[in-house]
Image (cartoon, helix red, strand yellow):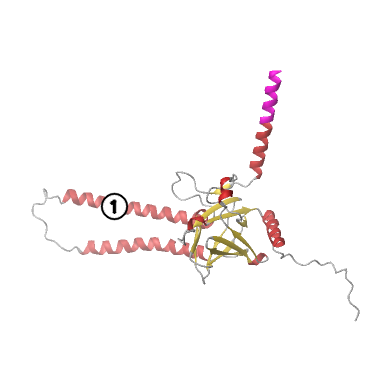
Amino acid sequence: MVGKRVLGILGILTTIAGLGVAGGASAQPIVGVPHEWQMDFPPSFTPLMEKVASLHDLLLVLITVICVFVLALLIYAMWRFHASRNATPATSTHNTFLEIAWTIIPILILVVVAIPSFRLLYYGDKAVDAAFTIKVTGHQWYWSYAYPDLGDFTVESRILSEADRIKLKPNQPRMLAVDEEMVIPKGTVIRIIGTAADSMHGWTVPGFGIKKTVIPGRLNEGWISVNNEGYYFGQCSQICGNGHSYMPIAVRVLDKPEFDKWVEQKKKSAGLLPATDVASATAPANR
């Protein structure tokens, strides 16, 4: 009897675990979110961020070589020109070769840094063959996302209320979860146009490699293209007032069919669906 009860309990637990796994498999994962004790850049989720990380690696190598070289010179100078070895200091004041070298070499280093830097700036500045545009507007203290190419509806994105923050869902990180995410399709080039309604804000998603300072009366352009579905998070990076820390950025990436369904739902909610082609049943008035 006891054995049957134990088997029954195990069966129930197995069923519950199976449902949990199935639910987790169908839910979208949290992909771009900070982790405790994280070091270095976050993973690259866009082609732009991959290039940013590549430039960072190049600069890290350059600065490491420079630091090691300067440290070696300092150690050599302290050893070679110590007072015990040079009771009488040298009187030479100029060395033409050295003066030319320490002028030309830094210039060459700056050229090596400047060329990929300018390429990266131009690469991330303008979208090429974008599928559609999203207008990002910063407010005190929330974000709004307009989709002018998909019916011109707008989504307002606010941090969850204090009451909602107490009962967070698995896909809602603390202080980053919002009531409405910016939703985009995966594998699609999307133009981002940024502006602000009141003060300067910073629309920044580290994993996307994008950081746009949005300014009232001005439009700044960028672009993103994310290959994997899931939730990605960022924060306002421009100190904009006492609600600055309550302006998280949440982006939900869907596959194309799911995104199209989301767009239709938002257009329907906003009353933007096209009128039906069925003729009116009301007879025209006699003239």
Horizontal relation, residue 189 to residue 277: left or right = left
The residue that appears at 33% across and 52% down in the rendered structure is 65
Span highlighted in magenta in the image: 1-13
The residue that appears at 43% across and 62% down in the rendered structure is 117
Q: Is residue 104 visible?
A: yes
The residue that appears at 63% across and 41% down in the rendered structure is 24
Front position in the image: 24 or 126: 24
Callout 1 amino acid? Phe
Q: Is residue 212 visible?
A: no
Above or below for 12 versus 100: above
Q: Residue 26's spot in the image, x, y percent?
A: 66, 44
Q: Residue under label 1, please give it.
A: 69
Horizontal relation, residue 231 to residue 22: left or right = left
Front position in the image: 97 or 169: 169
Above or below for 23 versus 256: above
Q: Is residue 228 a member of the stretch shown in magenta?
A: no
- Under circle 1, the secondary element is helix
Q: Residue 222's spot in the image, x, y percent?
A: 53, 64
Q: Is residue 12 a member of the stretch shown in magenta?
A: yes
